[in-house]
Image (tube, rainbow, N blue to C red):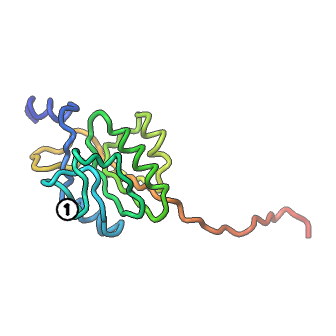
Amino acid sequence: MNAATQKTMFSSKTGDWATPQDFFDKLNWRFGRFTLDPCASIHNTKCANFYTKAEDGLSKDWEGEKVFVNPPYGRGIDQWIAKAYREGQKQSTRVVMLIPARTDTRYWHDYVMKASEIHFVKGRLKFGNSTNSAPFPSAVVVFEQATPRYIGPYVSTMEKS
């Protein structure tokens, strides 16, 4: 990786990391057809229903949607993750995020650790038209209301009959 590429990839000057199409297709198959891409551009959106930076997906309601989020990876990513967590708590809403696996951050512990699913991506993704892999590992994080599971009554084998 040359110095210019390295400087760009490690900086927060660009937060636009276009999701690889084949990776998105696998997520779309696994988690159901996505209906909303809240932080996209007209050039990189993955859904027919999307919000651009000017439309400010952070300020919109995502309730009832199956949301795919590949947020800007610079400053402010914590706001997207907090929003995804909150929206995922709404009825009939699933939010699937592709984010850097930065397990040492506050937002990871405050929100990601409360996710219903966390999947670490093996290897490094190539975003957009990049010829180089990302300099960071990635994770797919799913926020949605947990489905209540019935667990029968606890019966101790130590109790006397």
In the rendered structure, the answer to whether residue 35 lies left or right of residue 154 reads left
Q: Position of residue 91 (x, y in %)?
A: 49, 62
Please give the count of numbered marks on the rendered protein.
1
For label 1, the crowd category at 10 Å Cα-Cα, with few meaning under 14, some 14 to 19 and many 20 or more, is few
Does residue 122 appear anywhere in the picture? no
Quarter of the image for residue 104 reads top left
**Which residue is pictured at 46% across the width and 65% down the height?**
92
Q: Position of residue 73 (x, y in %)?
A: 27, 40
**Which residue is pictured at 9% across the width and 29% down the height?**
3
**Which residue is pictured at 25% across the width and 53% down the height?**
51
Quarter that holds the N terminus? top left
In the rendered structure, the answer to whether residue 4 lies left or right of residue 58 reads left
Q: Mark 1 points at which residue?
A: 22
Q: Which residue lies furthest to the right in this view?
A: 161
Task: Name the secondary structure under disc 1.
Answer: helix
Closest to the observer: 73 or 120? Answer: 73
**Which residue is pictured at 17% across the width and 48% down the height?**
127
Quarter that holds the C terminus? bottom right
Does residue 13 appear anywhere in the picture? yes
In the rendered structure, the answer to whether residue 146 lies left or right of residue 138 reads right
Q: Where is residue 148 in the image (x, y as percent from the top left)?
A: 59, 65
Closest to the observer: 51 or 124? Answer: 51
Amino acid type at mark 1: Asp
